[in-house]
Image: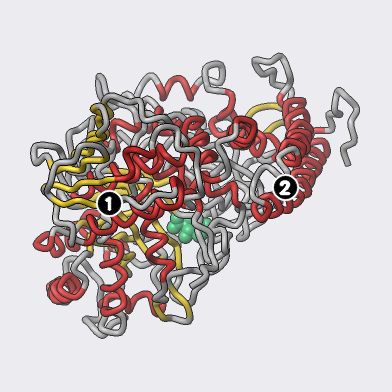
């Protein structure tokens, strides 16, 4: 069957063999069951990859030594999910302690061939940094995707589960970058999605989960906390009500029996209109622990989101600060969450802006399992129309020093378990895929899809290394292509930031849609997302004199942010209300900085387009054309942002641009 979708970085196009060919003629397997799903899939991948990239069909030999080739063997002493590659003369050994380690090792070898690397290594040992490496889909059962920018869902349609080959290809892609957990349905669980844990869907859900399982991926569902009420149980969802507990107990027994590869549930409770324990005067811990205790006998976990804030704020109220909410709602119960509960915390205290402070809850909690949540879907960062490579942003978050411990205190340390020694930890991302042929709308947005997985597996990789890997596997290993596309990716976040909201203030987007400018769009709304611009200045005062948010950080971070002189300038307006005439370290006034960056942002998009045009004929035409069309739209968007932001601040401040450029 002709597929209607691309294979992304697993396209296995012909490659220069660069000394790899002799190894790929024979593959031996020792100590693994070749009939088990994961091993079978790994071997099939090796064969496909070799055939496509090196034009050879490897001979597979079981439980026998080989003279030359790739020798895959089990080494029971190795840690779960880890693998070791070593080269000894005419043989490459791939050793792993379990099937997942084997699978990751296989994809590592395939990646090397796709990148046309010479097999000159001696020894490479890889063990994933994060225990859980997850993608969260916000797919609805009707086929729509909340914050989806690449077409409809490939899991659901018309309240049914789609059963086609795309799920398998999706699972392969995920496994190839080390993803080991997937949540398939939207965190906002409504309507038909509530029934995913009922007989209506069990068979198809179990099938889906089985496919994921055969690629080493645990299957998760988002759960409706009010399910007892909606599925004919007791007329309450109070987590301490015996009737509710009994209902969930029976439900969990049924669900885990019917969906064998179920890892557990993701829960959005008491957030943006979703029901939760607060409705019954209970704590978040009451809610999470009740469910966790009931899934524990099946090895299940409960991932509980911390995106809990008051979304019916009054813009006139300067004391309530949405940024404070996550910490205020969760810190007091630190230590009360059971061992199989993980709190999933967004990278910033607001909501996936192009720049915001790192959430003080990360590392603020000391006795609770934590998972970082980032957004690969570009909700506020250009919606896969504008180019915005997000790995540099994720790296900044991971490298952030929280000062929660004398050492090993970065966010990366906290979420990987290196800091507190806990094992139920990790990283999750809201995914950017959909049913579009190229999966991510903009072909270049697949760098984020790829990059998140690679980073979750190995947090020491640089954003640039990841970009290069992706370009080589996706487009070409030709030096010019690798260099230019990598540069485009690497500069894109700074460019996007320049033409949108300045210095960490965030928002200023069209309400609800979140694409394009609307400076005051959220200014007088209930969402708590204000910029507080007036005639004199702009920014939210989160210092001691303001909302006091800075005190949620450990020292010296708290004092650093509190003082305008030491606050990192890229976050200036996130923490301070600053006059337009304030001089930045560059010597420019704040207002001039706003004007300059907005003009620069547009020029940079123009320059990006030229670079892309110079690659015409050097990257696949379909991808070239798609990206070219997206760049046109990005340029329109960038100009709109530039003109609206500059005009807005000129009109507020009355201060003209020093360079006399056109402002409306
Ligand atoms: C954002 C987003 C919503 C989403 C929410 C969440 O607010 O706009 O669509 O539901 O985040 O993370 O739950």
From the top left corner, tell me how far across and down residue 624 is, in percent.
68, 49
Secondary structure at badge 2 equals helix
The residue lying at 20 percent from left, 37 percent from top is 67
From the top left corner, tell me how far across and down residue 110 is, in percent.
38, 43
Please identify the quarter of the rendering in which residue 596 is found.
top right
Q: Nearer the viewer, residue 553 or 66?
A: 66
How dense is the environment of label 2, judged by Cα within 10 Å: few (below 14), some, or many (20 and up)? Answer: many
Q: Nearer the viewer, residue 376 or 17?
A: 17
Query: Any mark on residue 631, and which?
Result: 2
Is 344 located above or below residue 421 in the figure?
Answer: below
Q: Which residue is mark 1?
A: 59
Is 111 located above or below residue 400 in the figure?
Answer: below
**Going from the N terminus, do you reach mark 1 or mark 2 first?**
1
Is 253 located above or below residue 55 in the figure?
Answer: below
Please identify the quarter of the rendering in which residue 183 is found.
bottom left
From the top left corner, tell me how far across and down residue 429 is, in percent.
41, 49
Left or right: 480, with 575 as reference point: right
């Amino acid at each position: 069957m002709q597929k209607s979708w691309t294979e992304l970085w697993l396209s296995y196009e012909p490659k220069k063999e660069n000394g790899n060919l002799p190894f790929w003629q024979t593959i031996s397997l020792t100590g693994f069951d070749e009939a088990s799903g994961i091993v079978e899939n790994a071997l099939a991948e090796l064969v496909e990859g070799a055939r496509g990239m090196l034009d050879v069909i490897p001979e597979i030999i079981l439980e026998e030594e080989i003279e030359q080739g790739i020798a895959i063997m089990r080494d029971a002493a190795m840690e779960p999910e880890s693998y070791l590659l070593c080269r000894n003369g005419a043989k490459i050994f791939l050793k792993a302690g379990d099937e997942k380690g084997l699978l990751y090792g296989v994809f590592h070898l395939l990646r090397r061939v796709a990148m046309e690397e010479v097999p000159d290594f001696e020894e490479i040992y890889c063990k994933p940094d994060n225990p859980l490496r997850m993608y969260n889909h916000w797919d609805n059962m009707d086929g729509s995707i909340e914050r989806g920018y690449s077409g409809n869902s490939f899991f659901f349609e018309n309240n049914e589960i789609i059963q086609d080959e795309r799920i398998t290809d999706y699972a392969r892609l995920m496994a190839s970058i080390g993803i080991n957990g997937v949540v398939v349905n939207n965190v906002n669980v409504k309507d038909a999605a509530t029934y995913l844990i009922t007989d209506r869907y069990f068979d198809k859900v179990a099938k889906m989960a089985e496919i994921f399982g055969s690629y080493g991926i645990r299957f998760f569902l988002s759960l409706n906390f009010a399910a007892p009420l909606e599925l004919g149980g007791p007329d309450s969802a109070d987590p301490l009500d015996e009737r509710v507990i009994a209902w969930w107990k029976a439900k969990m027994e049924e669900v885990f029996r019917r969906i064998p590869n179920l890892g557990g549930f993701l829960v959005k409770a008491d957030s943006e209109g979703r029901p939760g324990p607060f409705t019954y005067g209970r704590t978040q811990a009451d809610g999470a622990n009740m469910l966790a205790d009931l899934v524990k006998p099946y090895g299940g976990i409960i991932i509980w989101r911390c995106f809990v804030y008051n979304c019916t704020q009054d813009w006139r109220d300067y004391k309530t600060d949405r940024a404070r909410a996550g910490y205020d709602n969760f810190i007091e119960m630190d230590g009360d969450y059971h061992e199989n509960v993980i709190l999933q915390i967004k990278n910033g205290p607001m909501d996936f802006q192009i720049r915001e402070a790192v959430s003080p809850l990360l590392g603020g909690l000391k006795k609770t399992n934590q998972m970082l949540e980032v957004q690969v879907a570009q909700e506020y960062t250009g919606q896969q129309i504008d180019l915005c490579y997000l790995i540099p942003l994720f790296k900044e978050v991971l490298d952030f020093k929280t000062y929660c411990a004398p050492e090993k205190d970065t966010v990366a340390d906290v979420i990987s378990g290196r800091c507190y020694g806990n094992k139920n930890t990790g990283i999750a991302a809201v995914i950017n895929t959909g049913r579009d042929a190229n999966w991510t709308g903009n072909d270049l947005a697949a760098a984020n899809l790829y990059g998140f997985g690679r980073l979750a597996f190995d947090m020491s990789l640089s954003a640039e290394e990841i970009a290069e890997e992706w370009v080589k596997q996706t487009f070409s290993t030709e030096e010019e292509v690798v260099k230019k596309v990598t540069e485009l990716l690497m500069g894109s976040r700074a460019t996007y930031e320049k033409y949108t909201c300045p210095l960490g203030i965030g928002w200023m987007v069209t309400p609800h849609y979140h694409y394009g400018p609307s400076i005051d769009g959220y200014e007088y709304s209930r969402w708590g997302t204000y910029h507080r611009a007036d005639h004199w200045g702009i920014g939210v005062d989160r210092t001691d004199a303001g909302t006091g948010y800075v005190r949620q950080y450990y020292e010296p971070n708290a004092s650093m942010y509190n003082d305008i002189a030491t606050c990192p300038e890229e976050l200036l307006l996130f923490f301070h209300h600053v006059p337009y005439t304030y001089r930045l370290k560059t010597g420019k006034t704040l207002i001039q900085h706003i004007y300059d960056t907005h003009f620069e942002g547009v020029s940079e998009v123009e320059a990006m387009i030229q670079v892309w045009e110079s690659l015409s004929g050097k990257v696949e035409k379909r991808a070239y054309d798609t990206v070219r069309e997206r760049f046109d739209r990005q340029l329109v968007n960038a100009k709109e942002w530039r003109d609206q932001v500059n005009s807005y601040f000129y009109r507020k401040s009355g201060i003209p641009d020093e360079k006399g450029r056109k402002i409306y």
